[in-house]
Amino acid sequence: MRKSLILLCAMICAGAINLSAQTKVIAHRGYWNTAGAAQNSIASLLNANTINCYGSEFDVWMTADGNLIVNHDDTYKGKKMERATAKQISNFKLSNGEQMPTLQQYLEAGKSTNAKLILELKSLSTSVLETEAVEKIIAMVSSLGLNDQMEYISFSRHAVEEFIRLAPQGTPVYYLEGDLSPKELKAMGCTGLDYHIDVFRRNPQWIGEARRLGLKVNVWTVNSLKDMGWCIAYGVDFITTDEPVMLQGLLEKN
Ligand code: MG
């Protein structure tokens, strides 16, 4: 008993456990796992807000004619997102009957919510296209007056660097790939680590390192009670999940 108490104190002192902050819930592709919703639909964004999630994550592509749309996969019903036109996309229906949203429609809906809008720009086929997409996103967000509600994430290192360069100072920007240490992310200007849980299981020391460097820690996509418990014990700042209600229930018990 005494030994475990000493170990717990040592972990807290080392910054591996943060008892002061409550882990926040981010709905992965919105709160879609419920009747009438679909991944990346406006309904799932509104649902995430209704259950008071900290944020709602969604994925963005840019079409061949330079329009921004919300969808996860690079292909939908046989059509590549990057080769489609906005007109073609407008014919696509999601599984809940909603039209596949443009980014403009999605952000306009998000404006009526209290949820942070966690925008993931998918890795596009060239860095030039990624820069164009980031410029368009920042301009659209600004014109809608949404700067303070946004957070940006990407697997593309170039896109992350462009968000850091072009978004208003202080806007949260996270990198998803999992191959950079907290120190490297800090040097890039990232707000923190937004990595798959397996990356943190392999490198649990990164959680304490991130905290010492003033970086935030977000873990995805955490859907089991066991994994949620592991993340909460480490006091991570954010958990991104397909099961936000389950996670909220667990956090209430902690
Ligand atoms: Mg995503």
Image: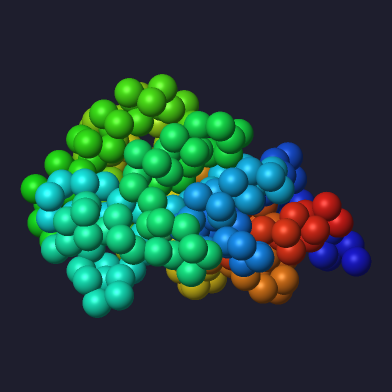
| Quadrant (top left, top right, bottom left, bottom right) of the C terminus | bottom right
- Tell me what residue is drawn at x 65 percent, y 65 percent: 34
Q: In this view, does 168 lie above or below 66?
A: above
Instruction: Tell me how many marks there are.
Output: 0
- Tell me what residue is drawn at x 58 percent, y 35 percent: 113
Left or right of residue 15, residue 252 in this image = right
Q: In this view, does 23 lie above or below 219?
A: above
**To which quarter of the image does residue 170 belong?**
top left
Q: Is residue 42 above or below residue 112?
A: below
Q: Percent position (x, y) of residue 207?
A: 54, 54
- Tell me what residue is drawn at x 72 percent, y 71 percent: 225
Is residue 17 visible from the viewing direction of this image? yes
Q: Percent position (x, y) of residue 237?
A: 60, 47
Q: Percent position (x, y) of residue 7?
A: 75, 60
Q: Residue furthest right?
A: 1
Left or right of residue 186, residue 46 in this image = right
Q: Which of 224 and 90 is in front in this view?
A: 90
- Tell me what residue is drawn at x 27 percent, y 58 percent: 89
| Quadrant (top left, top right, bottom left, bottom right) of the N terminus | bottom right
Is residue 7 visible from the viewing direction of this image? no
Q: Which of 78 and 231 is in front in this view?
A: 78
Q: Nearer the viewer, residue 107 or 128?
A: 107
Image quadrant, ligand 1: bottom left
Q: Which residue lies furthest to the bottom in this view?
A: 78
Q: Is residue 23 above or below residue 170?
A: below
- Looking at the picture, the colour scheme in use is rainbow
Q: Percent position (x, y) of residue 12?
A: 70, 49
